[in-house]
Image: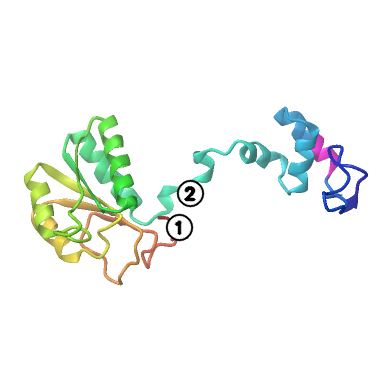
Amino acid sequence: MSDVESYLGVDKSLSGRRWIARACNDRNALAMAQRLGVPEIVGRVLDARGIDLDEAESFLNPTLKDLLPDPSSLKDMEAAADRLAGAVIRGEGIAVFGDYDVDGATSSALLKRFFKAVGADVQVYIPDRIAEGYGPNVAAMKKLREGGAAVVVTVDCGTTSHEPLQAAADDGLDVVVVDHHVVEEALPTATAVVNPNRLDDDSGLGILA
Protein backbone atom coordinates (compact mmCIF):
# COMPACT_ATOMS: atom_id res chain seq x y z
CA MET A 1 0.00 0.00 0.00
CA SER A 2 1.27 3.49 -0.76
CA ASP A 3 -0.02 6.99 -0.22
CA VAL A 4 -0.81 9.06 -3.30
CA GLU A 5 -1.37 12.78 -3.60
CA SER A 6 -4.57 12.32 -5.60
CA TYR A 7 -6.61 9.72 -7.42
CA LEU A 8 -8.51 10.90 -10.49
CA GLY A 9 -8.03 14.40 -9.14
CA VAL A 10 -9.40 13.55 -5.70
CA ASP A 11 -7.13 13.13 -2.69
CA LYS A 12 -9.61 12.38 0.07
CA SER A 13 -13.09 11.08 0.75
CA LEU A 14 -16.10 13.16 1.75
CA SER A 15 -15.35 12.37 5.38
CA GLY A 16 -11.81 13.68 4.97
CA ARG A 17 -10.01 10.35 4.84
CA ARG A 18 -7.09 10.18 2.44
CA TRP A 19 -7.21 7.86 -0.54
CA ILE A 20 -4.68 5.05 -0.43
CA ALA A 21 -3.87 3.38 -3.74
CA ARG A 22 -3.05 -0.31 -3.80
CA ALA A 23 0.43 -0.88 -5.16
CA CYS A 24 0.72 -2.33 -8.66
CA ASN A 25 3.40 -3.30 -11.14
CA ASP A 26 3.70 -0.39 -13.57
CA ARG A 27 5.16 -2.57 -16.33
CA ASN A 28 2.35 -5.12 -16.12
CA ALA A 29 -0.28 -2.39 -15.94
CA LEU A 30 1.06 -0.71 -19.08
CA ALA A 31 1.28 -4.03 -20.93
CA MET A 32 -2.36 -4.81 -20.13
CA ALA A 33 -3.49 -1.35 -21.18
CA GLN A 34 -1.70 -1.67 -24.52
CA ARG A 35 -2.89 -5.20 -25.25
CA LEU A 36 -6.51 -4.45 -24.35
CA GLY A 37 -6.63 -0.96 -25.81
CA VAL A 38 -7.81 0.56 -22.55
CA PRO A 39 -6.59 3.54 -20.50
CA GLU A 40 -3.54 2.90 -18.36
CA ILE A 41 -5.59 3.47 -15.21
CA VAL A 42 -7.65 0.38 -16.11
CA GLY A 43 -4.47 -1.64 -16.46
CA ARG A 44 -3.32 -0.41 -13.06
CA VAL A 45 -6.60 -1.36 -11.41
CA LEU A 46 -6.50 -4.83 -13.00
CA ASP A 47 -2.94 -5.46 -11.86
CA ALA A 48 -3.69 -4.17 -8.36
CA ARG A 49 -6.56 -6.67 -8.18
CA GLY A 50 -4.24 -9.53 -9.05
CA ILE A 51 -5.45 -10.01 -12.63
CA ASP A 52 -2.59 -11.11 -14.86
CA LEU A 53 -2.09 -10.38 -18.54
CA ASP A 54 -3.59 -13.66 -19.75
CA GLU A 55 -6.72 -13.29 -17.61
CA ALA A 56 -7.42 -9.63 -18.32
CA GLU A 57 -9.40 -10.07 -21.56
CA SER A 58 -11.81 -12.64 -20.12
CA PHE A 59 -12.13 -10.61 -16.91
CA LEU A 60 -13.27 -7.50 -18.79
CA ASN A 61 -15.32 -9.39 -21.39
CA PRO A 62 -16.63 -12.56 -19.72
CA THR A 63 -18.41 -15.15 -21.85
CA LEU A 64 -20.55 -18.17 -21.00
CA LYS A 65 -17.94 -20.36 -22.66
CA ASP A 66 -15.33 -19.20 -20.16
CA LEU A 67 -17.59 -19.17 -17.10
CA LEU A 68 -19.64 -22.35 -17.44
CA PRO A 69 -18.16 -25.59 -16.10
CA ASP A 70 -17.31 -28.46 -18.43
CA PRO A 71 -20.56 -30.48 -18.71
CA SER A 72 -18.63 -33.67 -19.45
CA SER A 73 -17.35 -33.65 -15.87
CA LEU A 74 -20.83 -34.66 -14.69
CA LYS A 75 -21.46 -38.37 -14.18
CA ASP A 76 -23.54 -39.97 -16.98
CA MET A 77 -23.42 -36.86 -19.17
CA GLU A 78 -21.86 -38.77 -22.06
CA ALA A 79 -24.53 -41.47 -21.90
CA ALA A 80 -27.26 -38.83 -21.80
CA ALA A 81 -25.81 -36.93 -24.76
CA ASP A 82 -25.35 -40.11 -26.81
CA ARG A 83 -28.94 -41.23 -26.26
CA LEU A 84 -30.46 -37.86 -27.09
CA ALA A 85 -28.21 -37.31 -30.11
CA GLY A 86 -29.24 -40.72 -31.37
CA ALA A 87 -32.90 -39.85 -30.93
CA VAL A 88 -32.46 -36.68 -32.97
CA ILE A 89 -30.55 -38.48 -35.73
CA ARG A 90 -33.06 -41.32 -35.96
CA GLY A 91 -36.08 -39.04 -35.74
CA GLU A 92 -37.36 -40.64 -32.55
CA GLY A 93 -39.95 -38.89 -30.43
CA ILE A 94 -38.53 -36.97 -27.47
CA ALA A 95 -40.50 -35.84 -24.43
CA VAL A 96 -39.39 -33.37 -21.79
CA PHE A 97 -40.94 -33.95 -18.37
CA GLY A 98 -40.43 -30.81 -16.31
CA ASP A 99 -41.18 -29.91 -12.74
CA TYR A 100 -43.82 -27.23 -12.25
CA ASP A 101 -41.52 -24.72 -10.50
CA VAL A 102 -39.26 -22.12 -12.09
CA ASP A 103 -36.30 -24.49 -12.46
CA GLY A 104 -38.41 -27.07 -14.23
CA ALA A 105 -40.36 -24.65 -16.41
CA THR A 106 -37.31 -22.78 -17.68
CA SER A 107 -35.38 -26.00 -18.25
CA SER A 108 -38.30 -27.42 -20.21
CA ALA A 109 -38.54 -24.29 -22.34
CA LEU A 110 -34.83 -24.31 -23.11
CA LEU A 111 -34.80 -27.98 -24.08
CA LYS A 112 -37.88 -27.60 -26.25
CA ARG A 113 -36.30 -24.65 -28.05
CA PHE A 114 -33.09 -26.61 -28.60
CA PHE A 115 -34.77 -29.77 -29.88
CA LYS A 116 -37.03 -27.73 -32.17
CA ALA A 117 -33.97 -25.93 -33.54
CA VAL A 118 -32.34 -29.23 -34.53
CA GLY A 119 -35.52 -30.54 -36.10
CA ALA A 120 -36.47 -33.05 -33.42
CA ASP A 121 -39.97 -34.27 -32.65
CA VAL A 122 -40.43 -32.97 -29.09
CA GLN A 123 -43.29 -32.62 -26.63
CA VAL A 124 -43.30 -31.09 -23.14
CA TYR A 125 -45.19 -32.41 -20.14
CA ILE A 126 -45.62 -30.41 -16.93
CA PRO A 127 -47.59 -32.32 -14.27
CA ASP A 128 -50.57 -30.85 -12.47
CA ARG A 129 -49.24 -29.87 -9.07
CA ILE A 130 -52.43 -30.78 -7.21
CA ALA A 131 -53.60 -33.83 -9.13
CA GLU A 132 -50.25 -35.45 -9.94
CA GLY A 133 -47.81 -34.09 -7.39
CA TYR A 134 -44.05 -33.82 -7.79
CA GLY A 135 -42.02 -35.72 -10.34
CA PRO A 136 -42.78 -38.42 -12.91
CA ASN A 137 -45.72 -40.74 -12.33
CA VAL A 138 -46.65 -44.03 -13.96
CA ALA A 139 -49.70 -42.67 -15.78
CA ALA A 140 -47.81 -39.71 -17.23
CA MET A 141 -44.94 -41.85 -18.49
CA LYS A 142 -47.40 -44.24 -20.13
CA LYS A 143 -49.17 -41.29 -21.76
CA LEU A 144 -45.89 -39.98 -23.18
CA ARG A 145 -45.03 -43.42 -24.54
CA GLU A 146 -48.45 -43.70 -26.19
CA GLY A 147 -47.94 -40.20 -27.61
CA GLY A 148 -44.91 -41.35 -29.56
CA ALA A 149 -42.01 -40.67 -27.21
CA ALA A 150 -39.07 -43.06 -27.36
CA VAL A 151 -37.05 -41.18 -24.77
CA VAL A 152 -38.05 -38.86 -21.93
CA VAL A 153 -35.81 -36.23 -20.37
CA THR A 154 -36.83 -35.31 -16.84
CA VAL A 155 -35.65 -31.89 -15.72
CA ASP A 156 -35.52 -30.75 -12.10
CA CYS A 157 -37.02 -34.07 -11.02
CA GLY A 158 -36.72 -37.82 -11.45
CA THR A 159 -33.90 -38.73 -9.08
CA THR A 160 -36.20 -40.35 -6.53
CA SER A 161 -38.88 -41.58 -8.96
CA HIS A 162 -38.02 -45.27 -8.77
CA GLU A 163 -41.44 -46.80 -9.49
CA PRO A 164 -42.43 -44.55 -12.43
CA LEU A 165 -39.04 -44.91 -14.09
CA GLN A 166 -39.04 -48.67 -13.64
CA ALA A 167 -42.50 -48.79 -15.21
CA ALA A 168 -41.23 -46.67 -18.10
CA ALA A 169 -38.29 -49.03 -18.65
CA ASP A 170 -40.62 -52.03 -18.58
CA ASP A 171 -42.70 -50.29 -21.26
CA GLY A 172 -39.65 -49.79 -23.49
CA LEU A 173 -39.29 -46.08 -22.75
CA ASP A 174 -35.78 -44.72 -22.20
CA VAL A 175 -35.40 -42.02 -19.56
CA VAL A 176 -32.63 -39.47 -19.08
CA VAL A 177 -32.77 -37.80 -15.68
CA VAL A 178 -31.37 -34.27 -15.35
CA ASP A 179 -31.75 -33.14 -11.77
CA HIS A 180 -29.98 -31.49 -8.84
CA HIS A 181 -31.94 -32.66 -5.82
CA VAL A 182 -30.40 -34.74 -3.05
CA VAL A 183 -29.82 -38.31 -4.18
CA GLU A 184 -30.68 -41.46 -2.28
CA GLU A 185 -28.11 -44.22 -2.20
CA ALA A 186 -29.96 -46.18 -4.90
CA LEU A 187 -30.46 -44.51 -8.28
CA PRO A 188 -33.61 -45.01 -10.36
CA THR A 189 -33.67 -47.20 -13.46
CA ALA A 190 -32.66 -44.89 -16.31
CA THR A 191 -30.44 -44.58 -19.36
CA ALA A 192 -28.58 -41.81 -17.54
CA VAL A 193 -28.90 -39.93 -14.26
CA VAL A 194 -27.17 -36.57 -14.56
CA ASN A 195 -27.14 -35.06 -11.09
CA PRO A 196 -24.14 -33.29 -9.50
CA ASN A 197 -25.41 -34.44 -6.10
CA ARG A 198 -25.04 -38.11 -6.94
CA LEU A 199 -22.94 -39.83 -4.31
CA ASP A 200 -20.51 -41.03 -6.99
CA ASP A 201 -20.29 -37.71 -8.86
CA ASP A 202 -16.95 -35.98 -8.33
CA SER A 203 -17.52 -32.95 -10.58
CA GLY A 204 -17.78 -30.63 -7.58
CA LEU A 205 -20.81 -28.93 -9.15
CA GLY A 206 -23.35 -29.67 -6.43
CA ILE A 207 -24.30 -25.99 -6.26
CA LEU A 208 -25.93 -26.12 -9.69
CA ALA A 209 -29.67 -25.43 -9.63
Q: Position of residue 30 (x, y in %)?
A: 81, 34
Q: Which mark is residue 60?
A: none
Residue type indicated by callout 1: Leu
Task: Please identify the residue farthest to the front as the structure is shown.
Answer: 15
**For the C terminus, which image quadrant?**
bottom left
The residue carrying mark 1 is 205
Label 1, label 2: how far apart the Cα atoms are:
8 Å
Q: Position of residue 191 (x, y in %)?
A: 23, 54
Q: Position of residue 175 (x, y in %)?
A: 20, 52
Task: Please identify the residue farthest to the top as the structure is shown.
Answer: 37
Task: Please identify the residue farthest to the right as the structure is shown.
Answer: 5
Q: Position of residue 51 (x, y in %)?
A: 71, 45
SS category of the residue bearing label 1:
loop
Q: Is residue 51 left or right of residue 70?
A: right
Q: Is residue 84 left or right of residue 103?
A: left
Frontmost residue, 159 versus 170: 159
Does the magenta run of residues contain 29? yes
Query: Residue at point 13% right, 57% down?
Result: 169
* Marks 1 and 2 close (CB-CB < 8 Å): yes
Range of magenta residues: 25-30
Quarter of the view holding residue 57: top right
SS category of the residue bearing label 2:
loop
Query: Residue at point 18% right, 53% down?
Result: 127
Q: Residues within 10 Å of mark 1 (few under 14, many from 20)?
A: some
Residue type indicated by callout 2: Pro
Q: Is residue 72 above or below residue 61?
A: below
The residue carrying mark 2 is 69
